Image (cartoon, rainbow, N blue to C red):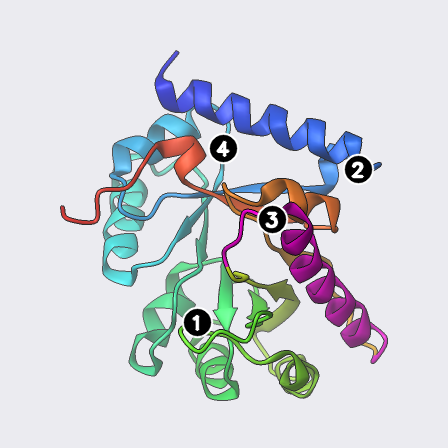
């Protein structure tokens, strides 16, 4: 077995353990393998172990990987998630090549994704990114603006609003981690009370997945624990 295979099995076992410890079913938590900066060989290695959902931050890099897999492994049905910041001039290839987008925080971006989603593809699954900690350096709609934006996005054709995503302020304090994720869960519930059915809380990464699962995450975005440390200097 490869190192990625070993790491993947360890992460899945960790998710299962934490879910059970939190009184939840492990089947309620999906694993999104964040493969940004790693080559297509790493993706194929993880896919050979049964992993199908992969998250990418950088559009051009992602498109190259998607194209390679489609050309060289056409029978391999992978689910591609875009999780990085979105520029308005990049919405078309995102709408055409991804199944999920986790980082929508403006109505303009949602409108463009809706207009540019090909009619022969299923609706594009959308998570609204919320800047739950209010950090000036991070993308995301502020919590108080999330409901009005969700109501607008829910009306757009070719999109399916699935839930919320957040990257809270980094901390090693477990209770502080839980508090941030709890706030997102409460916001998710508030939006649901306005008639929008949401089924996805995209929260939790390698450093805080335990707190996220304990607070109701349904999708954890794990990269380092699967693929190893990233080399951004490549």
Mark 1 neighbour class, 10 Å CA radius: few under 14, some 14 to 19, many 20 or more: some
Between residues 145 and 79, which one lies in front from this camera angle?
Answer: 145
Which residue, given by chain and number where applicable, does mark 1 sit on?
Answer: 138
- Local secondary structure at mark 2: loop
Task: Reply above or below: 157 against 44.
Answer: below
Mark 2 in CB contact with mark 4 (< 8 angstroms): no
Taking the view exactly as shown, the residue that stands out farthest to the top is 1
Q: Nearer the viewer's eye, disc 2 or disc 4?
A: 2
2 or 3: mark nearer the eye: 3
**Left or right of residue 197: residue 10:** left
Q: Nearer the viewer, residue 170 or 74?
A: 170
CB atoms of marks 2 and 3 within 8 Å: no
Q: Residues within 10 Å of mark 3 (few under 14, many from 20)?
A: few
Query: What residue do we see at 57% from left, 67% from top?
Result: 126
Residue to which mark 3 is pinned? 173
What is the C-alpha distance between the residues marked 4 and 1? Answer: 29 Å
Mark 2 to mark 1 CA distance (whole Å): 29 Å
Q: Residue 71: horizontal and vertical position, in percent?
A: 26, 42
**SS under mark 4:** loop
Residue 22 shows which numbered tag? 2
Say the numbered circle drawn on residue 197: none
Q: Earlier in the sequence, mark 2 or mark 3?
A: 2
Query: Residue pushed farthest front?
Result: 173
- Disc 2 crowd rating (10 Å Cα; few below 14, some 14-19, many 20+) is some
Report if the CB atoms under discs 3 and 1 are less than 8 Å apart. no
Q: What residue sits right under mark 4 in the picture?
A: 51
Could you tell whether 122 is left or right of 77 in the image?
right
Residue 40 in picture, x, y percent from top left: 27, 38
* Extent of the magenta region: 170-194
């Amino acid at each position: 077995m490869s190192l990625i295979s070993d790491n993947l099995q360890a992460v899945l076992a960790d998710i299962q353990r934490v879910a059970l410890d939190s009184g939840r079913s492990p089947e309620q938590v999906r694993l999104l393998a964040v493969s940004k900066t790693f080559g297509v060989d790493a993706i194929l290695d993880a896919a050979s172990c049964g992993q199908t959902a992969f998250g990418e931050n950088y559009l051009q890099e992602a498109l190259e990987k998607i194209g390679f897999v489609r050309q060289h492994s056409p029978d391999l049905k992978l689910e591609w998630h875009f999780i990085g910041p979105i520029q308005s001039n990049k919405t078309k290839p995102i709408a055409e090549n991804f199944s999920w987008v986790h980082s929508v925080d403006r109505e303009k971006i949602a409108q463009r994704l809706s207009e540019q989603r090909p009619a022969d593809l299923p609706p594009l699954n959308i998570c609204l990114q919320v800047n739950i900690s209010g950090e000036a350096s991070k993308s995301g709609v502020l919590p108080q603006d999330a409901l009005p934006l969700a109501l607008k996005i829910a009306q757009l054709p070719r999109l399916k609003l699935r839930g919320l995503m957040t990257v809270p302020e980094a901390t090693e304090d477990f209770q502080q981690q839980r508090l941030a994720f709890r706030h997102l869960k409460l916001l998710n519930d508030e939006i649901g009370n306005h008639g929008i059915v949401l089924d996805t809380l995209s929260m939790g990464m390698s450093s805080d997945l335990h707190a996220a699962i304990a607070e109701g995450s349904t999708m954890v975005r794990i990269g380092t624990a699967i693929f190893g440390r990233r080399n951004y200097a490549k």
